[in-house]
Amino acid sequence: MCTGVSFVDPEGNLYFGRNLDWTVDYGEKVTYTPANYEFKTRFGAPDQKRAILGMGITCEGLPLYFDCVNEDGLACGGLNFPGYAQYEEGPVDGKTNVAAYEFPLWITRNFTTVAEVKEALKDVAIVAVQIAPQFPVSMLHWFITDNKQSIVVEYMADGMHVYDNPVDVMTNQPTFAYHLENLRNYMNVKPEFPATVKWDKMELTPWGSGTSMFGIPGDYSSPSRFVRAAYANAHYPAQEGEAANVNRLFKTLQNSAFILGGAEVSTGHYEYTIYSSCYSTRTKTYYYTTYENSAVRSHSVDEFDQNSDQIQQAA
Ligand SMILES: C[C@H](CCC(=O)NCCS(=O)(=O)O)[C@H]1CC[C@H]2[C@@H]3[C@H](O)C[C@@H]4C[C@H](O)CC[C@]4(C)[C@H]3C[C@H](O)[C@]12C
């Protein structure tokens, strides 16, 4: 599964990242799409030509982003949502039709803020169409964020749902509404050092910190990762500067990451955190680690040719 997280530092810079949890990689790379790239949208949806940096692959001349951020600091990531996601079978008359595979690209090419996205989505239909025979349509929901607010977009049998996301985290199924409601099961959990209590003649003293967190679920299921990510994101103290904020995002993601051996998918293969990412709008840099290499690598937009019209991928 996957976990997405964002927060804003005291200077107003957005940090946005995700774990990509799966059994295989797709050969994804840090991918830059310059503003001048000619985005041939599947159903003629408009393209407002913003430069984008993120993680993805290319197929049929198109960047297919797993997560990405544009030059104005609007971010979008796709997370699995099978069993719930249901897109349109074909383009819908009178709507702006966007193929599911181009959704993160289309959102970040066209808008500057989440507020604009929320308004535009009222007229958008997401269409189930394959980009190529080797790629089935991914059943996803999307986490979209800027430095003011974040939302979750879920397209289901009864239409599009756009939720405000007050915890700035996201995982997988079930619905976002379930995840928010589920947090109320953990209202007792807090960071404070527990006070000594008396049970009749018996005085109970804490044996250390952390016991006020009893009840936080430790497993890798989507609801449990959501709770852990929301708790960490809400309680991590504000940090100053790039390094401490990037570190904060990676620590929060690690807290919801999969290690080999913990959880199998239905085919019997272990699911693991293939990569973790952190985009900083402060320096327009995409940081990432992989399962095999926990050293943080990074690429900033300055490394790419911004005047080109070609997709560029880091080595
Ligand atoms: C597998 C990824 C999601 C990880 C995740 O959430 N796993 C959950 C596991 S579980 O079911 O909940 O157990 C998703 C996120 C983005 C997806 C990719 C992007 O949507 C871009 C293209 C879209 C094409 O339709 C399919 C290939 C693809 C390259 C997708 C492959 C795959 O579905 C990705 C990589």
Image (cartoon, grey):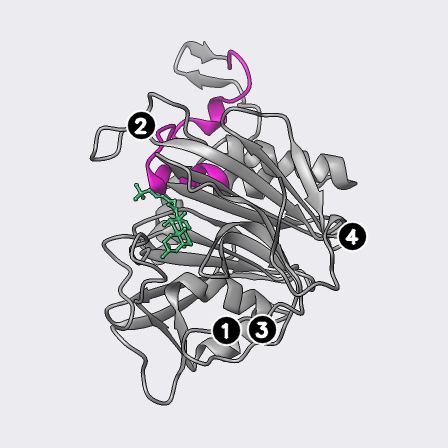
Q: Is residue 6 magenta?
A: no
**Over which residues does the magenta segment extend?**
206-229
Residue 188: image location, x then y, percent: 44, 37
Q: Which secondary structure, mark 1?
A: loop
Mark 3 crowdedness (10 Å alpha carbons): few <14, some 14-19, many ≥20: some
Give the Cα separation between the discs numbered 3 and 2: 37 Å
Q: Mark 2 points at which residue?
A: 270
Q: Look at label 3 and name its amino acid.
A: Asn
Q: Which secondary structure, mark 2?
A: loop
Mark in front: 4 vs 2: 2
Mark 2 crowdedness (10 Å alpha carbons): few <14, some 14-19, many ≥20: some
Give the Cα separation between the discs numbered 1 and 3: 13 Å
User: Is there any visible trace of residue 216 in the rendered image?
Assistant: no
Q: Is 134 rendered above or below residue 243?
A: below
User: Is there any visible trace of residue 286 in the rendered image?
Assistant: yes
Q: Look at label 2 and name its amino acid.
A: Tyr
Q: Look at label 1 and name its amino acid.
A: Lys
Q: Earlier in the sequence, mark 3 or mark 4?
A: 4
Q: Name the residue under label 1.
A: 40
Q: Which secondary structure, mark 4?
A: loop
Q: Look at label 4 and name its amino acid.
A: Glu
Note whether ligand 1 is within 8 Å of mark 2: no
- Identified at 53% across, 37% down, the residue is 276
Q: Is 129 rendered above or below residue 271?
A: below
Residue 69: image location, x then y, percent: 61, 57
- Identified at 34% across, 31% down, the residue is 271
Q: Which of marks 1 and 3 is nearer the N terminus?
A: 1
| Residue closest to the far bottom | 94
Q: Is 60 rendered above or below residue 252?
A: below
Q: Name the residue under label 3.
A: 110
Mark in front: 1 vs 2: 1
